[in-house]
Image (spheres, rainbow, N blue to C red):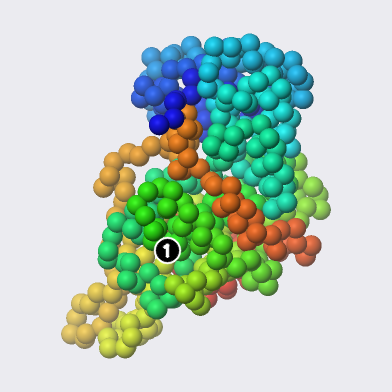
Amino acid sequence: MELRSDAVVFFGVTGDLVAKKLFPALYELTRRGRLDLPVIGVARSRWDDQQLITAARKSVVEANDRVDDEAFDRLAGNLTMISGDYADPATYQHLAEALSTAERPLFYLAIPPTVFGAVVDGLAAVGLAARGRVVVEKPFGHDLASSYELNDALRAAFAPERIFRIDHYLGKESVEGLRVFRFANRLFEPLWNAEHIDNVQITLAEGFGTEGRAGFYDRMGATRDVLQNHMLQVVALLAMEPPTGAGDDAFREEEVRVLRQVEPLSPDSTVRGQYAGYTDEPGVAPDSRTETFVATRLRVNSPRWAGVPFYLRTGKLMPGTATEVVVEFKAPQRDLVPAADGAGTQPNLLRFRLGRNDGITLSIQAKDPGAEVSSRPVELPVDFDAALGHRREAYERLLDDALDGRHLRFAREDAIEQEWRIVEPVLDLTEPVASYPKGSWGPADAEAMAGGWHPPTLR
Ligand code: BG6
């Protein structure tokens, strides 16, 4: 059992991620009695402690209907700020003084990858890396080659077991639920293969745009931002074989094994789109070819999935927000019951809602009322919030895990490298991206891709 960290430092504390996710996570951990240690914010902006506290309070108020003032005050009492340039050795000297009594500090790099190297070197130079853990936010590099460089830089300063790579989808209860669904239920396991499944569709749709971070997003695009990481992790959970043993290590090993079996994406079966008006946004290059939408077909080269396409699509400014997997089963072997509307029997669909309204819906055929024996689809829905109660947010769970030095919910280095290998052929394509209207499902070619997508449940 690893010892829990005794201080936590956020590089990039004035940024978007800390405001949206990490302050609320710190507050929640404090409220539950899981966090009472020095929390130091580092940023180039000249903030004092009070500004840090004010920013934290604003985030916590925005994320919660009701704030427990006593808990917030406890968090505020632990917050301090260090302003300084990431390339300036003085920044790290100040930090080392502030952490003089901390034996196992956790360093959270909520900063662009371009400054990872400077921060890691700075921490190493004052001896902090040797006794600390580091949490790295995605993107882990820009492509396969740069992910190797990033790993080399991290490993030069931190021992491998002290490096934590965040893919926050791994911290979501709903995504972890896929593991439970697959391996704690006998019901679907015999059907979970090419003999019974026709195709799998994964949609990560967002009803909003780049939300004030267009400059960052423009260097990224949808493939690097979410397809390479969040969506491929979901593919791995759906497609993996049962682990050879019961432990977490065996599970993680199997996840990586299936990623190795995924064929590299092909530009011919990939559609990239950009919403109309994107290039007018501040921070976006006027001639930008960055995709705000991507749809693709991938294949898992394993006997279980022979010939089964996995369709993936993600985009900004879609008709609504949803992260949903639809598993489409094959039609019955014999067509013995006609469909009520004469349109042909609808396939059984198993939907995993992985977003805010998480749950599962199974569509089955039921008898259409009346004199004729015909079928029509009905849905068996489960809403996890109603069935299981409130679950903790991904960032709260991940931060708690990192403080404890627990790796299960962090991305493995070899998994990330496989993910880059898979997307590499569709990165940096030079063809123009197809424009799509805001609030649509992307370019027409993408709509046609899965033979018509099953519309996800929007919120
Ligand atoms: C982040 C991306 O990693 O994931 C964002 O950078 C995206 O662009 C977000 O909006 C989606 O996460 P979630 O948890 O809201 O589905």
277 relative to 342, above or below: above
State the image coordinates of residue 149 (x, y, percent, origin top left): 72, 44
* Farthest-out residue, right: 287
Task: Give the quarter of the figure containing the N terminus.
Answer: top left
Name the side, left or right, on which 43 lies relative to 393. right
Answer yes or no: is residue 354 visible.
Answer: no
Name the side, left or right, on which 456 lies relative to 280. left
Q: At 51% from the left edge and 33% from the top edge, which residue is drawn?
A: 21
Answer yes or no: is residue 342 visible.
Answer: yes
**Crowd tier of the residue under label 1, counting other residues whose Cα lies within 10 Å: few below 14, some 14–19, many 20 or above:** some
Name the side, left or right, on which 187 lies relative to 33. left
Q: Is mark 1 within 8 Å of ligand 1?
A: no
Q: At 35% from the left edge and 39% from the top edge, which residue is drawn?
A: 391
Q: At 45% from the left edge and 62% from the top edge, which residue is drawn?
A: 240
State the image coordinates of residue 156 (x, y, percent, origin top left): 68, 35
Viewer-nearest residue: 184 or 440: 184
> If the picture is divided into quarters, which one holds ligand 1?
top right
Residue 84, image quadrant = top right
The amino acid at mark 1 is Glu
State the image coordinates of residue 165 (x, y, percent, origin top left): 56, 41
State the image coordinates of residue 355 (x, y, percent, origin top left): 44, 49
Q: Which residue is mark 1?
A: 241
Viewer-nearest residue: 351 or 421: 421
242 relative to 59, above or below: below
* Farthest-out residue, left: 371
48 relative to 25, above or below: above
Q: At 33% from the left edge and 82% from the top edge, which residue is drawn?
A: 332
